[in-house]
Image: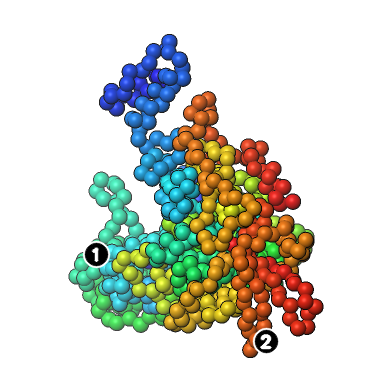
Amino acid sequence: MHLPRLSLDALQPNWPEPDAAAAVPGVLHHGVPVAVMERERVVLANTPAVALGVQAGMRRGGVQALSAQVVQLEREPAAEAQLMTALALALLHFSPHVSLHPEPDAATVMIDAGASVRLFGGHRALCRAVYARVRRLGVFLQLGCAPTAFGAAWLAAQPFRRDRHGRMVRPARRALRPARMARLLDRLPVGMLRNVADEGWLDGIGCRTVGEVRGLPRAGLQRRLGADVLARLDQAYGEVPVRFAWFAAPPEFAQRMELPGRTESVQGVMAGAQRLLLALGGWLAVRQAGVTRLALRLEHERYRLGCETPATPVTVSLAEPSRDPAHLCRLLQERLDKVQFTVPAVGLLLVVEAMQECLPRSEALFPEPGGTPAGLGRLLDTLMARLGHENVLQPLPLADHRPERASRWCPVDEMPARAPAAPAQAWPARPPWLLAQPLPLAVQRHRPCHGGPLVLLSRPERIESGWWDDALATRDYFVAERADGLRCWVYRQRPGREEGGEYRWFLHGLF
Amino acid sequence: MSSLVSSGSHAPPVDPPVPPVAQPAEAGRQAALEALAQRHPGLWRAGQLGRAGQAGSVPALETGHAALSAELPGGGWPLGALTELLLAEPGVGELRLLRPALAALAAAPRRLALVGPPHLPNAACLAGWGLPARQVFWVRAPAGAGKAAAQADLLWAAEQVLRSQAFGGVVVWLPAARPEALRRLQVLAQAGDAVAWAVRPAGVLRESSPAVLRLLLAPAPGNAVSITFHKRRGPVREQPLVLPLDEMAAVPGRPSAPRPAPAEAPLPRVSQAVAGEQDHVVLDRGASAAPVAGRAAAELA
């Protein structure tokens, strides 16, 4: 993966959704001409700027003279390094073998995905998946594919060329067999060797392409240019083995990024957070883990309000560990919607606070209509995590005459594997609602009242039970109706020995 | 109107001849409307009740009460949409009203969720109704939480339940939910095929609601429930429907008051007000148009 516009993308991300980007205040739009300067010289300019005549190597004054509209940004190596790290982390999703190109300014990341080609559905599908994921980081990307790492890096980095009609054509960047790769590499311009050799000198001796350089006598080439050129050529053509320094994911995930401007909108923050979440997805993939709690800190300008402004934390907790950036993105969006932006954010810091091992699910051919059992399990996990497991219940009726005992509910995670058969219903009508505590009713003219006098409809149902477990119930239950038709289940506490012989009425249920 | 009918050039000219202008405008209007309905079978007028297989119909689950099904668009509780049940106080027979639908869902077999009921659901009663214990879930707010926190928790739980699409029927009690929360539930319900009932106090009758069906339930003497159709895709019905419930047949009625007539004569499909002067009806009537608002307030007081 070669990023030809790294210095520009690091400063001004070009998100792939142009309409979303246009709505984000603070992010420069695509139509604005931008030039990146380093030591008073233009390093890189975007398409509108090139159309105005800006070229690499121009001085600041020259650009100013061409057009005053060109936005001149200073190059920031730190931001570029952060972006490369984010890219490498995001690519860990595809393979644990990710390596940053050793040459400075190469702006290239190499991954060894040979073992994962079948998993991702073939070369083309893999390339498409890599391209889509990297594009969501907001960078422009050239992707090369070859049997050797440095060969692929050269294929990725080769510039666009013009055909004989003067049109820009995209060169072939994909080679699966070594023979085709050698043919493609032979055609590359000598400019590709600029980091290991003096391209002007090679041009001076009449070499136009890499193939011509390779055809020169090796001994003479080594004497004049040093061993680097030959070593790199051999590595690229796969004639000597290469040792790579693999990119090692940091033990703790805490990635930071500067937002391109002061941002007060959820979309602006989400556009930035997406890059961090993609990096997080790769980091979790290599750990075989899923995040259960993560925090996004919105950093503000210091002393904006005249005092030290602390970062605003936005925490997302998950019951089921996940490493899907799209899922995390949705969750984060919901949380961000609740945040009041009093101070614009200038930076983001994504920290993983807790994670768990997580294995990817196997896919089903036909989705089940009522959701998968795993889906129900995830839902119950989520509910129990927030509400407590004693608040997610299933009925487990008990054969007992006392209604409050018969209506037994059991936490979902403690349900017996084989529920006992429901007790036979030989009883008179039972109400669907029970009151948690029986409500004492006032008595007027010997009739119980609940918002109005109640008329007893049924004959008494006598329940006398529980002398053995200290919850003695001696009650006569009635179905009663209020004048407006509300049907209640009331009982009369029969006088016990210690009571004065007076009937007391209670409301115990509602129909 | 006549120009509108004749402008459909793509349709074959099978419609009856357009009456001349000299005839009464009413007859011409009726003829034009009939021609229009004949030409576009999918045309639904706000004054019509969508029947199953006809214009304006929505996928629905049979309510199990013939008199109620006849009054609902699609002939039952709408699937993949939010139904609002407004109660002056809990326990007016709302679960007995839903019992046939819940039993049908459980037999499908789909899962049922009760989110935040105000009283304890009686497990013995649910088992007696034939709802399998494995398919019934009761979700309640943590004990000791404040009112607002409990409501937020329950809303969140209802959203999760609807989002998971693992449930066929969701009954959620929302004593103090804002209309935005209802809208979220409605959007989530649309994504699935569950029947979602939101039970709310009658006091929210004044607020507008995104629910496709709003019914005000009140108890009625003689083992019945009185249903006022506050919002439905169909003609305005001012009189409440007194629906006798099948349960508790063994319980004798009130000795003094005789049982009222089981149901009123059904209204014509297109109410007169709609067929006559008005071209459209208000789908979500506000408080001023609600004939029952005063009564609901009195019940609350």
- Which is nearer the N-term, disc 2 or disc 1? 1
Provide residue A214's location: percent of width, then percent of height: 24, 71
Name the residue carrying label 2.
A470
Can you name the residue that lies furthest to the front here? B255
Neighbor class of circle 2 (other Cα within 10 Å; few <14, some 14-19, many 20+) is few
Neighbor class of circle 1 (other Cα within 10 Å; few <14, some 14-19, many 20+) is many
**Residue drawn at point x = 74 percent, y = 51 percent:** B301
Q: Pointer 1 indicates a residue of which chain?
A: A
Instruction: Let me know if residue A373 appears in the view.
Output: yes
Measure the alpha-carbon separation of dots 2 and 1. 90 Å
**Residue drawn at point x = 37 percent, y = 31 percent:** B37
Same chain? Circles 2 and 1 = yes
Can you name the residue that lies furthest to the left here? A179
Name the side, left or right, on which A480 lies relative to B237. right
Q: Which mark is residue A410?
A: none
Establish if B54 lies above or below A437. above
**Residue drawn at point x = 66 percent, y = 43 percent:** B293
Name the residue carrying label 1.
A184
Q: Name the secondary structure under disc 2.
A: loop
The number of discs equals 2
